[in-house]
Structures are given as structure tokens and as C-alpha cells.
Amino acid sequence: NYYTYFISIYFNFPQQTKRLRWFCPPSLRRNTMPKPQPINTSLSEAEETMTQLLSPLRTRDDNDEHNEHLPRPLPPPLPPPPLSPTSGSNRGSAASPRISSSNAKRRQLEGSSKNGLSDEEIDLVLQNLAEEKMSLMGAGMGKQTWSRYIVENYLADKKWYNPNANNPNAPSLSKGWAYFEHFTLPRHFTEPNASKGANLIRAPPGYGERNAQPTELYGIFTTSQSALSDWGTGMGMYFSTLSSMGVVLALAGLINIANILYYSSDEYDPGEGRDNFFLLNMLQFSAICTDREWVLCHDCDENVRFWNSIFTNSNYGTAIDDETGEKVVLIHRTTCLPAQFAQGMWNYGTLFLLVLSASAFIWYLSKLEVRYDEQNSSPSDYTVMVKNPPKDALDPDEWRDFFDKFSEKQVTLITIALDNQSLLVKLVQRRRLLKQLRALIPEDTDVDDEEAVENALDEARKRRLEEQSCFGKILSYTFVPFLRLFGCALSEKTIWKRIQSTTEEIKKLQQMEYYAAAVFVTFETEQGQRTALEGLNASKIEISRNKPMSIDASALFRGVVLDAVEAPEPNAVRWCDLNYTDFQMKLRELLTFSITIGLVALSAFLLNKARTGVSTILYSVVLSTFNFIIPLVVRALVAYERHFDEGATQASLYIKITFFRWVNTAIITTWITPFLAVLGEKNIDMINTVNALILSEMFLSPLLRYFDLFSFLDRHYFAPRAKTQEEMFGCFSGGWYNLAERFTDFTKVLLLCMFYSAFYPLIYFLGALILFIQYWMDKFLLLRSWQKAPLINPNTARFSRTYFTTAALVLGAFSSAYAYARSPYTNLCECSEENPCNETNSRSFGNVQLLNGQSLDAVRASEQEYFFCNQRDIDFPPIPINQGSVQWMTQSQETLSRIYGWTSLILLIVYVAVVLGQSLIRSTFSFWKGMYKPRGTDQRKDFSSGVGLESFAYIPQIDAPGFYLPFLACSIDDIDVKLIDWKNPNRKGEEDLHRSYDDQNLIFDVPFDGMKRSRDEDITVSRQIPPEARLRPVFSILKHYPPDWANK
């Protein structure tokens, strides 16, 4: 349709032909083209002409039985557009035009290089022109991002936004946005005549643009919840958890409507202060008590410390009795009713509903987890990971022959990961130094030529000194030396020396002998993997002692009991951590968790001192500081840990951040708030603080995630000012996100709802609204902003619902039980015949001195007198018999506390016995027997039938911060490149697809004896490798055994 549309314009509008003459495909274009003349051609004739032109481009074999599951491709809308010039890692884009919707674009098209535009560049221009015609509609329909539409149509030619707008040699901003939409953001294949609810097949980054397979962005509202499992089962479980618990919290809110109405009525609080609350704060529906009266307290002078804080010092006063001349104590107490049985039972019914819902929730999500896993066939469904291979087992054929006995058809891939993490770290460090150097020297400098680099360094230094201002010279002698102590603002010479020294270290590391750290065996069928895991299902004692007890002797590899598990997803493997043992990993985790506990304790101590001893302003500053710093510190601690896969890393991060946020938001808030300020109406009192936390989670947190400052600056400030196309691509790599932190925010909201529901029943509705906002905001960011992340397994989701969701219920039950038992939070008990007091006849007092230093001219005290009773001092469990020597509960309150107290104790016992006990029992049994059990059903798909779509190889690669593409760490010459789940946009025009990954492959950076070829050399070249180098591999080993039908 696009071809027909543009050809019809060409035939009928001659004035457009100056620009549209490029629409002829490059293979059919003549060297010279005469001036076009008007042609009277019908639209049907144009369609017939284009059908003939496009017929050679249809390459799909519809009779291939192995392509039945693939989406049927449409004809390519345009020839393949490269997103950047075909260049190596150090090639620039000086000859590439900057493409935008402005006059600068036409100037670039008319003469950006001496020899004119290349075919690939023209094709890119055509693609952008075609998109301009539909940009507004595309943005409105979600086919494009609104940001790209606004930038290319309104901002790209503004100097304040894009300083390089009129520079034809500048990197292309349009290419950057095209990279963002086609490589960073997720896309799916489009099917003609597909129904709206049809299952979507996710396209690998950049796939459709080169493979004539049309793709489009996922729709925000049209993408189903089940389709989100394409980002990993863990991501699918996250959104399912939000939606499920949102419904549960909404139902809990409906049950609590009676309590919401009760707290807002004059029956509970007849005071007029409730009418002064701001409506959006919703505090009029909470247990805040605004009605107070002055009363006489006979022994409160001995317990003045309970009122001596910034929260309550205005509620304690002393005066002189005019009749007796004695000092009396006056307390400004709340008059609201204590806990009532009816209201407490509504909350108790909510707890009962939540317990039942949590049970159903756990069961439902566990079934949904299996369904998501079955719905998305992934490499982990076909692959076994051996964690303890013999060190010298470096022959992939030997591993294939061993595992063939378990296979239903065959073994398809073998990856032997070596313990060369020290070498890989140095290679990445060298890449980072080279990136810094290239930013300081001319772009076309060959960094492998030392003489050229030395000359470029001298020129760069001269140019820098010539352009340096007076202020810059002052900084170079004062501030810059300080920065260089931390490795920043290094000079060109220093960086080059570090590169040289790092290169020498790498050469020494290449001479070392490396051993097998882990082996990944990919079967052609899921059944092959399951049979292997069942046959190798050994206990921990068998593995540690290398003594078979329950497994067959034929399952031994070289006499070794293998520790075989289901492999994580390929892009979730932490290749530099595979050589660590389980003991070493647990030891590091224990150390980091101990540090986390220390940080939480320090946070609690400082917050307590700031809130009770200084001011609420300092408390807010300290709280905000810890909320910002501790997650960063925890991430650094987790980076010190070692894990086999990202799923385990996310689980560790989740536990630590959740522990901190639970303590910091719920437990510390309750602990450091004075007992008498629980029901207070001041902004610093507890319920007001909780309401502020809820509103922050509802509005501030989503907005901060939406306006991701760092990503916003990258795309809209640094990208238009990038010096190279590669640097610009890095600015469009997308925002960083972490699944563990997303789950942490969910569990924090759940705990807040459970912990404070007795005081604030409306919090259930607010919590449901927060989860609703969180669901749609995170879905939008996942589809329109966040960068590609490893496919995370459901370990974090499973851990969250099993331990933390149930723990939130137990903590909520105890919080409500203590809330009702300690009511009415006055620390005052009425004087009576059972508890007599020395009554005071006077009721009017003047010159009352308050603890906060102020004074009242006149105070009228209530007729009822009181004495001090510590209502906070109640033992565990919170039942009436544990009140102590003084009884303050009403009969109704005692009945309620008895029910709630014993129930909370029972829930605690069930949690310890069932939740923690089950895990303990399973962990104990694993020492004596293997615990593997297959999950879900075999989907009966061959691994090789999904190559390039859902089947990818376990290829060692490293995601390094500051680089927009991962680095490969092994040779890929002997495999199908479709087994790599990403493509290099810088080398899309490469005829040999293997060489298109050379720039991102670390094995070519520093030559060594075992190299088969050098970078950009033809893969058919076969070098003579010394025998000792063959026996001593430097990088991991990967071998592909495609089935016969795939070779055909």
C-alpha cells in the first residue's frame, strides 16, 4: 500500500519528483535520470507495475514445514535501512547525513559528501520520509512515540535544542530516535488480518528492518497482561500480582465502608476540628481525634516524660490550685471513644478475607506462573546447566556424547564457560578507556597504530591548551588534580598510558590456563532436558562427596556426580560469576545482609534522634536522605555478591531493599512516634505521617519514574550534542529499571495497608488505587521508555508472594490487635471506687504553664479526674489478661482484643510452621535426595524451529555500563548468528553477518596465539593454530550441532 501510494504521487504530481525520484530501489536505479515528465497512468497500472518490481523480493518458502509457526511476512515496505553507516567501533559518521524534518535535511540530501549518498543512506532517507507522512497518525495510534514526533517536527531544527541542526557532518538525530524505537523499545511482528486479542510474537531488536518482516511497537492498552510474560516469567508475574492484589484491596475497602463512615461521624469524634481537614487528605475518614478536654491527673507529674516531646508537650500543663496552694497537673486528652467491638469486627472480617484471598492468590499465581512458562517457550526450557564440571572437560563433543543418552532427538548446542573472569574484566576496562580516549582525539584515528595515536594526542593537547580559558586554567591547577585522584578528568596521555598497561596485563592473562566453570547443554526438545534433569537428580550430599547413592552409575561424567539444574535465560546468566562456589556466594550474601541490617539500625537511631530530639524538618531531611542513599548502597552491596543468574541477584536485592523499606516506612514510623501522638491531628503525628507516605506513593513516586531525569537528559540534551553516532545511540539506550525494586514498592504498599488499617480503614481503597496507577505507569514505561533487560525467572515473584505477602498479613494482624488493645491512647484511667484518687475541688485554673514554654491564661477542667496508666505496656499476645496491674479496657474492647490477640498468635504459628517450616523441610530433604520436579507440560516444539524468534544460544556476553550493546566473549564463527538475541545497528549492511558482531566481540581486541582470524577478516580464513594453543583455550567454547533438516 505504501508503494502504491507513493508511486501514485510520482505519476500524478510531477512537482514532487525532485524528491521522490529516489523511490526506485537501488538495484534498479540508473546512474543518470532524466527530468521526469507528467505521465497519464492509472492507479491500477501503477499497482501492476509495483507488483512486478516487488516479486523478486518475496523470499519466504511457504512450503517449508518448519516455518509453519512463523508469522507470515508482508512485502518489505522499503529496502533495509541501516541505522548508522557500516563502520567499526572506531569509525565515525562524518560522511553520514543528519536526517530530520527540516530545511537542513534537504541541504544534506543535496550535498553532504563529495560522491553523493550511498544506497543505504538514501534508503534510510526514504524510510524517514515515508514515516513523516504518517507521523502524526502514527504517534496518535501508538505506532511511534510522541517524543519522536514532537522532536522531529518541532524541535530538531531549533538551535537551542539541537546545536548541530545545520551541520551536515553531525550524527543523525533521526537515526538515534530510529534506534530508540527499533532497538531499545520492544516491538512485535505484525500479522495481516490478525484479531485484536491475538497472541503477539516479540521481535528481536532490529529484526524486522533487515528481515523484511514488519514490526510495530506494543500498544499500551492493547497489549494483554499475558503478553507481558515475553519480558520473562518474572515480569509477567509482577503485573499479575499488581492486578490481583489491587482487586483484593478494593474488596477489603468495601468491607471497611462501615468503619470509614464511623470514623467520620460525630459518634466517634464530636469535635469541630475534623471539618478543617483538606478533603483530598481523606483524614476525616481516619481515627484522628480532634475533640479534646482538659482533665486533672493526680500522678502524671511522676511520668512527665511521656508528654515531654515536640509531639505532645502542648498537652501537658501545670498550675497552682487557689484553694490549697498545691501544684496540679492538667492533661489535654482526646475524648473519642475507645475501640468498639462492632468496628473491630469489620476489620477482623477484612483480615479473614485477606487470609483467604492470600491463599487463593498464592495458588492462582503459582498456576499462572506455569501457564506463562508454557506460553513462552524459551532456551531455558531446553537447556541444562552443569555447575561443577571437571576442570579439564573442554571438549564439547565429549559433553554432547554424554548427554545424547538423555536426548529425545539430539543435543543441539554446547557452551563451555571458562573461569576467565579476570581477563574479561580487563578487556572491558580497556574498552572503557578506549571510549574515553576517542572522545578526546580525532574520530578517524586508528588506535592500533601507536604512532598515529601519539600524534593525535599531541594535537589534542595543543588544541585543548589553545582553547582553554583563564577560568579553565585555574581549574586545571586546583580542582582537576583532585578529580584525577578518583580516576576522573584524566589527560589524554594518562588514558593512553593506562590503555598500554592494561593491554600488557591482558597479554599476560591470555597466557594463563583456564578451566571449565560451567557447561550449558541445549537439547532439541524439552523432553530431552527433563529426562536429563531426572537422570541427574542428585542430592547435595552426593554432589559434595562425589558419591552416588540414588542416581545410576551411568549418570556419572568421568566418575563425577554432576550438579545439573535448569538453566536460566541466556541473557540472564552472569558469565563472570560462574566460577564461584555456593559457599563463597552464601558467605558474601551473609556479609552484605549484615551490613544492610547495620545501615537500617543506623537509620532508625538517627531518625529517632531527629524526630524526638530536634525537629520534624530534620527528620524529613534524614528520612529522605536515607530513602535515597540506602537503596544505592544496597545495589553496591549486591554488586559485590556473586550469583549464577540475574534472577538470584534480583531476589537478593529484593530482600534487602524490602527489609529496609518495611522498617523505614512502617516499623520505624510506629516506633519513633510517641504513644500519645498516635491519634493526634498535627502534621507530625502518626496518621498524618502515614497519609503523607500514601499520597507520596500515589503521586510522587509514579511521576518521578515517568520523568526519569537521567533518561530525559540523555535523549533531549546529550543526544543532540553527541559527537559520534555511537555516542548518540548510547543516549537512546533507555531508562534503567529493576524488577526487584518494583516488587519492593508493591510489598511496601501492601504492608502500609495492613499495618495501619485499624486507624485508617480508607487506606485499602487508597492502596488499590496506588497499585492501579503503578500497574499502568510501569506498563507504559516498559513499552515506551525502559531499556531491554535480562529475562528474569519467577524467583523474585515466588519469594514475594510466599514470604513477604504472608508476612505482611501477620504483621498487619498484630498491628491491629495492639491498636485495639491500647485504645484510646491517652495513658489516663478514670478515678473510681476501685481506683480512688485524692480529688481536687477546683476546676478553673489560671496561668497554666505548658511544657513547650507557653502559658494559658485560663483553663476549665472536666469534672472527671484521672490517674496515669501506661496503656502501651501490654505483653504478647495483646489480650486482656496481659494488661498488667491496671485495667483500662472496656468490656467491648476486652472481647475484641481477646479475639484479635489469639487470632494473630495463631497466624504467627501457621506462618512459622507452614511457610518457614516448609522451606526448612525442603532444604533439609535436599541434602538426602534430589528435589527436581518438572513444571508444566512439554510444548512439543523443536528448539531449532524457533531460531531467531524465541530460540537463542547461551553465548558468553557482558553488559557493561556506558555501552549500549553487550560484549561477546567467545567465537561465533561456527554458529548461526540468528542464535544471538540482538543485532548491531552499526553493521547492518554487512554481507557476512558473523563479521557484523566483530566490533562487539572482545576476543579480537588483543591478538593471541589461539585466534582463528582477526577482526573484519573473512570467516573462511583458516589460520594455523599452535597445538599448545588448541589445548589451552582462552575464551569460552561454543559449538552448534544443527539438525539435518535445519542444514537443508
Image (spheres, grey):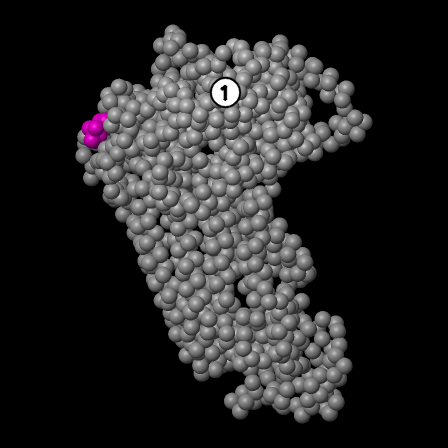
List x then y, in percent, for residue 854: 75, 73
List x then y, in percent, for residue 327: 71, 84
| Tally of numbered discs | 1
Residue count near mark 1 (Cα–Cα under 10 Å), binned few <14, some 14–19, many ≥20: few
- Is residue 21 or residue 391 the one in the foreground? 21
Q: Is residue 408 found inside the magenta-colored segment of the image?
A: yes
Can the viewer see residue 874?
no
List x then y, in percent, for residue 409: 21, 28
**Going 50% across and 74% down the picture, which residue do you hit?**
261
Q: Is residue 119 shown left or right of residue 546? A: right
- Work out which residue is located at the far front of the displayed protein and give it: 40
Q: Is residue 307 found inside the magenta-colored segment of the image?
A: no
- Image: 596 above or below 1007: below
Q: Is residue 314 shown left or right of residue 565? A: right
- Is residue 784 or residue 1016 the one in the foreground? 784
Quadrant hosting residue 856: bottom right
Instruction: Give the dominant element type of the magenta stretch: helix, strand or loop.
Output: loop
SS for tag 1?
loop
Can the viewer see residue 677?
yes
List x then y, in percent, for residue 170: 63, 23
**Going 48% across and 19% down the picture, which residue do you hit?**
24
Highlighted range, magenta? 402-410
- Image: 775 above or below 465: below
**Going 67% across and 67% down the picture, which residue do you hit?**
310
Name the image quarter holding the N terminus. Answer: top left
**Going 40% across and 67% down the picture, which residue do you hit?**
351
- Image: 547 above or below 912: above
Q: Amino acid at mark 1?
A: Ile
Name the image quarter holding the C terminus. Answer: top left
Query: What residue would you read off at disc 1?
Result: 39
